[in-house]
Image: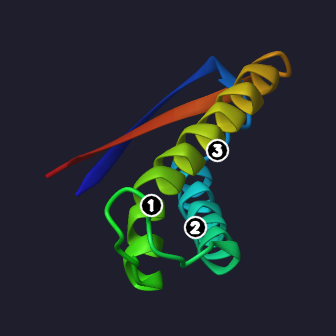
Amino acid sequence: MSSHDSSETVEATVRRVPRFGVFMGIGVVLGVIAAGILTMVGSYEPSAAVNVVYPPGQVFGFLLLWTVPIGVALASVVALILERTARRHDHVVRVEHETIIEKD
């Protein structure tokens, strides 16, 4: 068995980009924390319109419907801004691209 090597030098662009999934996950966590804080500081008196008292668990769930998407959206905007600023710091480097072909 013999092998044949071929290599070439090419240019590649290297840049650091944020991981959007991590930022969205942080946005979810911040949304849950915000919903918890809003639930704790909320008032649980009967509603004037329907004379109903909503339990804290139901209030927390309803607040999650608002705070989590807002947290994800804000964290995604932050990630986009960081990605745009990272694009300015691109580096062009030379890399050696090798291909090894084994012959039987």
Q: Position of residue 35 (x, y in %)?
A: 58, 67
Residue located beneath label 1 in the image: 48
* Along the line of sight, the residue nearer the viewer: 76 or 37: 37
Residue at the location (70% across, 28% down)? 83
Q: Quadrant of residue 91?
A: top right
Contact? badges 1 and 3 (CB < 8 Å): no
* Numbered label attached to residue 92: none
* Numbered label attached to residue 35: 2
Secondary structure of the residue carrying tag 3 is helix
Task: Decide which of tag 2 and tag 1 comes sooner along the chain.
Answer: 2
Q: Amino acid at mark 2?
A: Ala
Label 2: few (<14), some or many (≥20) within 10 Å? Answer: many
Q: Amino acid at mark 3?
A: Ala
Q: Quadrant of residue 17?
A: top right
Please say which color scheme the image uses. rainbow
Q: Residue furthest left?
A: 104
Secondary structure of the residue carrying tag 1 is loop
* Numbered label attached to residue 75: 3
Q: Position of residue 94 (x, y in %)?
A: 73, 23
Q: Is residue 102 visible?
A: yes
* Along the line of sight, the residue nearer the viewer: 46 or 35: 46
Q: Where is 32 relative to 83, above or below?
A: below
* Along the line of sight, the residue nearer the viewer: 27 or 7: 27
